[in-house]
Structure formats: structure tokens, C-alpha cells
Amino acid sequence: MAPKIFISAAEPSGDLHGAALIREFLAQHPDAHFVGVAGPKMREQGCQAIADMTARAAMLTGVVSNARAAAAVLARTTHEFSHHHYDAAVVIDSPMLNLPIALRAKSRAIPVLYYIAPQLWAWGAYRAHKVRARVDKLAVILPFEEDYFRNVGLDAAYVGHPLFDHLASRQPDPAQVRAIQAAGQPVIAVLPGSRKHVVREVLPGQLEVAAAVRQRHPDAHIVVSTANPTVAKIIQEGTKARRHGGTKGNCQSSIVSGQSSLASLLSAADLTLVASGTATLEVAYHGCPMIVMYNGSRLMYHLLGRWMITSKYLSLVNILAQRELVPEFMPYYRTTGPIVRTALDLLASADRLDRIRAELAELIAPIASPGASARTARMLSEMIDSGSATADNN
């Protein structure tokens, strides 16, 4: 019988990785059928969507504003599990939505694979018992996670980071790299993120830092990357407002979009101002020195976040390095003054920039191999086969 799989991804990155997983699984099982909480990329691969949460994606406490939408999705998921048979459920990242979905699947005896596991090691370690009760297998994407989750009693396997499946096909264009560098020096790349609320929080500070760099380096070329059409208007409006200068300085900048353009930009850049998240790994993959920024709610951090966050570092690059390899200013900052000073200090030292490039290359090399999607697809297939064997024996 053709396998039928429920799959859930609530953010654009999860939608991208979910689509790759579906594609790899269908290569092994062409008759398989996927249904679930799916964004546009998963739907392109044939997934039947009961809901799409990707446009509502939020970070940390921002998901509170989406509680009503999440409740509606959970109600539809409950109905789906009650009225249709599924051989497995795959939940991708987004634990605030996907742990409740996993609970509903387990209550119907549906095997659950969690892909891109909750970052319990950084915050929320108290939820380990929930994950144990709701999840059969974890496909983890960072090397240290396998041992961490196994030590708390979870069946985890390291599959690699799916980002590198995509980066292998996103090579820089040498002509575009030369053109970016010829337009001005130094080249400052600005990556404000892929979610609307993150862009709104981070972009103003990034542009303020870039404007201060231009005051010291009048020929600096500032290039802002637009991650997706959803945030394009916010970025265009933000950069346009900064062109008028004002008390915080003018920041004349250009905008690029598309993954191939981003690869060229990161290859050309001397320094990247990047919002915290997976994008930091992409910057590291291209060996570009960076400053990681995130400017969330100070109130929510002091009321909630500081009691939950257990990781010494918050950016992925520094977590992997287990030291401050790149400067990070998060989860919030009161002023951009220290960030400006850090940026100017970095740009003033070619030796330091070269050392960071070398250390990033050394950090990324062991994990930069593609294949995460294919390995996760095999895990899913084995889980379904194991479940079928158990059912037959019963």
C-alpha cells in the first residue's frame, strides 16, 4: 500500500527543507502521498495542504500573536488524524506548533519523526519529557545534538544540516562578484532576515551601523539582501527612508534578491551584518566575517527569556564554535554604538578579517556536505517499514 504521511512546517525555512524531504522520499516511493501544514514549496512537491502557517512565522515569543491561527490548525489536524489513516507524521522545527501536533499523532498511534529538533540545549530543556512522550525519532542537524538528545533518552540521529543541500547549487557568479566589489570598498552586506517582524526589528539598526561605516569609509558599498518577496516591501521602505539621512546619517544602499545573487554578495563582502538564524551558517559557508544582530523585546527577555535560555552563546556560528568566533549582539541591544565600534575595528584590521575567514572555513568544513534530506528520507522510510512490520506481527 502506498505510504501516506502527514507533514508539518510552519516557517519558510521549514517549508524549504520539507519540500526537499518530500522530493527525496518520492524518489524512493513515487506513490507516496503527503498531507499537512505546508507552505508553497512543499505544495509544489505535491503536498496537499490543510493549512499554511509560513506567512505567519514568528520567532520566540512572537508566536503568541499567532495563537488563534495555531489553534485553528491544531483543530484541523485533530480532525485529519481522526478521519484518515497515516503511516507516519513528520514535524519540522517550530516546536510551539509541532509538539502539540506530535501529541495528536501519538494519541492515534501514528509514528512521529521530528526533523530539525527543538533546541532544548539552548532553551527549554524542561520540555525533554514532552519530546520523549510524543516523538519516536529525531533527525538532528547539528553534530553535538545526537549525543545531547540520546543522553536525555531520545532516539536521535545526526543527518546533517539541510541548508547545505541547497547551498551546493548556489554558486557565486564571478562577474557579479567583481561588479559588486568595483562599485565601492569596503563591501558591507546587510541580511535582515526572512520574517517580517525580524526585518522590522533588525533592519533599522543594521542600516544605522552601515551609515556609520560610510561616515568613516565614504566609498563603502552597502548592499541589502532581500530573502523573499514577503519581506521585500519592508526592506525597500526601510532603505528608502534611510536615504534621506536625518540625525542618524545617510545610508545609500542597493538591494539584491535571489539566492545566486546572495552567494555572489557574500563572496564579495568584507563584512556582513546578519540577523540571527540559519543565515549565519550561510554567511560562514562563504567565509565572510560577520556581526550577528537581533533586537527583540527587552521586556519579554527579562520576564521570560533570561530564565529559559541556557546557552552561553546565541548565534549558531558561536554555538558550533563554543566560543565567540564572531561578534553577536542579541537578544537585544539598547544602542548601535558598540556595534558600530566593532564593525569599524574589524574593517581596520585586514589580519583579523583574514583570521576570521580561516576560522569560519575550518568550522564549516566538517558539516558542509549535502545529503541531509536524503538521509532523513531514509529514516522516514525505515520508520514506516518498522511500523508496518510491527503491525503485521500483531
Image (tube, rainbow, N blue to C red):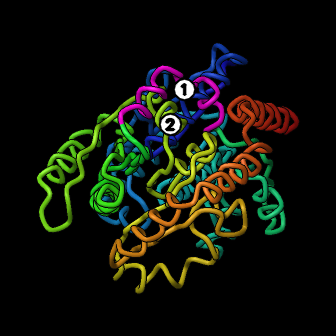
x and y percentages locating residue 190 in the rendered image = 39, 48
Q: Which mark is residue 268?
A: 2
> Which residue is depicted at the point 77% across and 62% down?
149
Does any portion of residue 328 appear in the rendered image?
yes
x and y percentages locating residue 245 in the rendered image = 14, 57
Write down the residue under mark 1: 172
> Which residue is depicted at the point 28% across and 62% down?
208
Does any portion of residue 138 appear in the rendered image?
no
Give the magenta range: 163-183
Q: Amino acid at mark 2?
A: Ala
Q: Is residue 174 magenta?
A: yes
Quarter-of-image position of residue 184: top left
Q: Is residue 387 magenta?
A: no
Q: Residues within 10 Å of mark 2 (few under 14, many from 20)?
A: many
Quarter-of-image position of residue 327: bottom right
> In 3D space, how far apart are the residues under numbered discs 1 and 2 (Cα atoms)?
9 Å
